[in-house]
Image (cartoon, grey):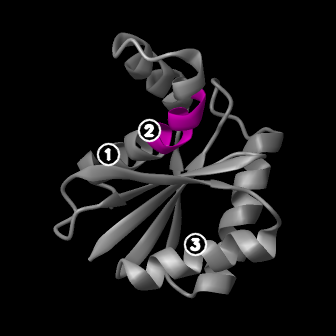
């Protein structure tokens, strides 16, 4: 049983996947967004190819916990994804995951260009690892 995590942005979607036991999260790749139909088809290919049984979508709540425009977009994306893919989709609080990803990449002394290419999939990995470590799965 593998779990896929998505860090959904306007231009890119960071992707991470769990190991078969659901213990660790590994970054997978970053999808450059084209349109919802193409994005869902590409995610569906990953789901079937990697034997994914659940998807976790990062929910970018405001720092005070309220739902803003980005969180509303994540809700809409998750609902449509659930309809298109046909497996459980769960939203997961992702506040500060992108900042944490950038901090990790800065500590690794990566150039700005490399950080921009990697931050989405590292953020997805952080979202998934947080989900896997929780008791709410």
Residue 130 screen position, x and y as percent: 34, 43
| Circle 2 residue | 122
The nearer-to-camera label among 1 and 3 is: 3
Q: Distance between the residues labelled 3 and 2?
A: 17 Å
Height in image: 109 above or below 78?
above
> Please, what is the dominant secondary structure of the magenta stretch?
helix
Q: Residue, x 71% and y 59% (percent of image)?
A: 75
Q: How far apart are marks 1 and 3 (CA)?
A: 19 Å
Query: In the image shown, does 23 or 36 lie closer to the viewer?
Result: 36
Give the mark nearest the N terminus, 3 or 2.
3
Query: In the image shown, does 58 or 51 lie closer to the viewer?
Result: 51
Q: Please, what secondary structure does the residue beneath circle 1 have?
A: helix
Residue 67 screen position, x and y as percent: 74, 41
Give the extent of the magenta segment. Answer: 116-123
Say the numbered circle drawn on residue 43: 3
| Circle 1 residue | 129
């Amino acid at each position: 049983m593998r779990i896929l995590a998505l860090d959904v942005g306007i231009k890119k979607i960071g992707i991470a996947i769990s190991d078969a036991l659901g213990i660790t999260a590994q970054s997978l790749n970053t999808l450059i967004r084209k349109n919802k139909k193409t994005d869902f088809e590409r995610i569906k290919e990953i789901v079937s190819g990697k034997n994914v049984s659940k998807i976790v979508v990062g929910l970018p709540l405001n720092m005070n916990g309220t739902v803003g425009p980005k969180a509303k977009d994540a809700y809409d994306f998750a609902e449509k994804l659930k309809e298109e893919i046909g497996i459980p989709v769960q939203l997961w609080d992702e506040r500060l995951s992108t900042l944490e990803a950038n901090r990790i990449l800065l500590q690794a002394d990566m150039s700005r260009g490399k950080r921009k290419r990697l931050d989405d999939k590292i953020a997805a990995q952080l979202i998934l690892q947080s989900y896997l470590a929780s008791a709410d799965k």
